[in-house]
Image (cartoon, grey):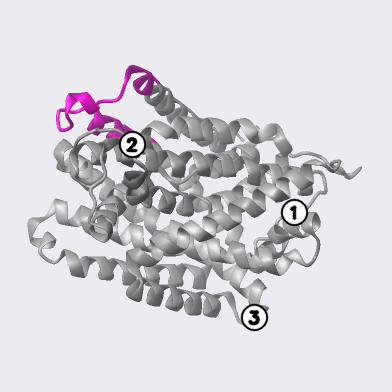
């Protein structure tokens, strides 16, 4: 693949996978975890959001870099490393896919129940919502993902930035009884790891844009060059990182110091979440913002349930040639399997949305060093032309990122032993 200059036509043709990535990111990690972080710790925790976005950057960039340089998906890069890489990736993503999809589905369900004021159980609401998502996926597929995400993310981003600017012009009112929780005790460290686990998204999601890029080519009949694909990546990655700071800032400006304990109920939590905008814009904005947030989470859920089956099926096809012959069926087998597993978990843990979300994000963080390492190995290998190898500064940043991810994983494990 050539690395010729950027053109407006080429950028517009290539733009898509990066937006889908941003849509997956600006979901539970931003709407929920970033807002919770600001509400609990104020701006003190902003360093964590900045550093995790910085240190995860190389490993997401490597996913794009490999596809841009070779025209292949990152999964094929793992297979080039050896069966150990693709098999281990498959096992880990199988485990994370179940909990991650369940977590985003239950957050979406809470917003839907709150928005429509439906009094059904979370299990039944999740089942109905899942049915709608599967129908959207069946009839719309990639074109629906690509088209809807660009509009939804733009609207939510503009509303969030405006809300932040308005809130910044008001003084922060701190309750006299408020005591800021300790960030470095066992509970604080667990929350810190949970925040960073899905910030901006789990590292295994670095494979998704390479799969979506292939779908985008089929849709547009245009093969982007190296620079056009990397431009698409930076739009999504940098945009989602900036939005994480705005969501954290909203939590800090509107909710910090009020001693609010976020509910484990997904419906009650949704009400608390939307109150951030309601207190800024006025009560009239609550249904509007709830609708936008719901659309965002629906898009995230739709993106996740498209990406994980696509990744699991693709991995299996690269592990076994006989399985690859049935690759078209594999996608829907995994869609149905993950849907069934999610409903089973929701049926067992309907009252603990917050705990489920924290569990999912912690698992993602602990698995991150492996995903980061194999991405690093792929772009440093001979399977990618030398001219597309990362520059020295990016190598240094990726090594620092590996140390950061491993270091905080060790801190988390020690906190469980010591405290």
Please provide the residue range marked out in magenta: 369-396
As for residue 63 lying within the magenta part, the answer is: no
- CA–CA distance between discs 1 and 2? 49 Å
- Residue 32 in view: no
- CA–CA distance between discs 3 and 2? 49 Å
Which mark sits nearer the N-terminus, 3 or 2?
A: 2
Mark 1 or 2, closer to the camera: 2
Depth order, front residue of 217/177: 217
Q: Secondary structure at mark 1?
A: loop
The quarter of the displayed image where residue 417 is located: top right
The residue labelled by disc 1 is: 261
Which corner quadrant holds the C terminus?
top right
Question: In this figure, what is the number of numbered marks?
Answer: 3
Which mark sits nearer the N-terminus, 1 or 2?
A: 2
Outermost residue on the front side: it is 8
Q: Position of residue 412 (x, y in %)?
A: 53, 35
């Amino acid at each position: 693949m050539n690395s010729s200059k950027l053109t407006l036509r080429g950028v517009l043709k290539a733009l898509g996978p990066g937006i889908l990535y941003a849509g997956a990111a600006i979901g539970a990690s931003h709407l929920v975890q970033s807002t919770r972080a600001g509400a609990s710790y104020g701006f003190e925790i902003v360093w964590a959001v900045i550093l995790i976005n910085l240190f995860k950057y190389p490993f997401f960039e490597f996913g794009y870099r490999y596809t841009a340089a070779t025209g292949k998906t990152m999964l094929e890069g793992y297979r080039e490393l050896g069966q150990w890489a693709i098999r281990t990736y498959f096992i880990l993503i199988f485990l994370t896919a179940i909990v991650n999809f369940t977590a985003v589905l239950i957050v979406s369900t809470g917003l839907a129940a709150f928005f429509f004021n439906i009094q059904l159980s979370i299990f039944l609401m999740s089942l109905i919502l899942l049915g709608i998502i599967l129908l959207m996926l069946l009839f719309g597929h990639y074109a629906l993902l690509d088209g809807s995400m660009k509009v939804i993310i733009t609207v939510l981003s503009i509303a969030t930035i405006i809300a932040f600017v308005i809130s910044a012009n008001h003084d922060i009112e701190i309750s006299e009884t408020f005591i800021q929780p300790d960030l470095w005790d066992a509970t604080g460290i667990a929350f810190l790891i949970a925040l960073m686990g899905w910030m901006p998204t789990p590292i295994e999601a670095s494979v998704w844009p390479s799969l979506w890029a292939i779908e985008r080519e089929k849709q547009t009949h245009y093969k982007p060059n190296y620079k056009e694909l990397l431009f698409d990546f930076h739009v999504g990655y940098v945009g989602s990182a900036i939005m994480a700071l705005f969501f954290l800032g909203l939590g800090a400006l509107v909710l910090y110091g009020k001693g609010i304990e976020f509910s484990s109920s997904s419906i009650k939590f949704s009400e608390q979440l939307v109150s951030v905008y309601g207190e800024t814009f006025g009560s009239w904005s609550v249904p509007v913002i709830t609708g936008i947030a719901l659309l965002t989470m629906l898009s995230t859920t739709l993106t996740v349930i498209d990406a994980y089956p696509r990744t699991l099926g693709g991995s299996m096809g690269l592990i076994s040639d006989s399985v690859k012959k049935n690759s078209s069926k594999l996608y829907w087998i995994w869609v149905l399997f993950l849907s069934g597993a999610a409903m089973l978990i929701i049926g067992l843990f309907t009252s603990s949305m917050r705990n489920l979300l924290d569990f999912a994000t912690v698992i993602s963080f602990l698995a991150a060093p492996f995903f980061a390492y194999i991405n690093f190995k792929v772009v440093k290998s001979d399977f990618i032309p030398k001219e597309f190898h990362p520059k020295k500064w990016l190598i240094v940043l990726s090594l620092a990122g590996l140390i950061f991810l491993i270091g905080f994983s060790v801190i988390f494990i020690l906190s469980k032993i010591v405290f």
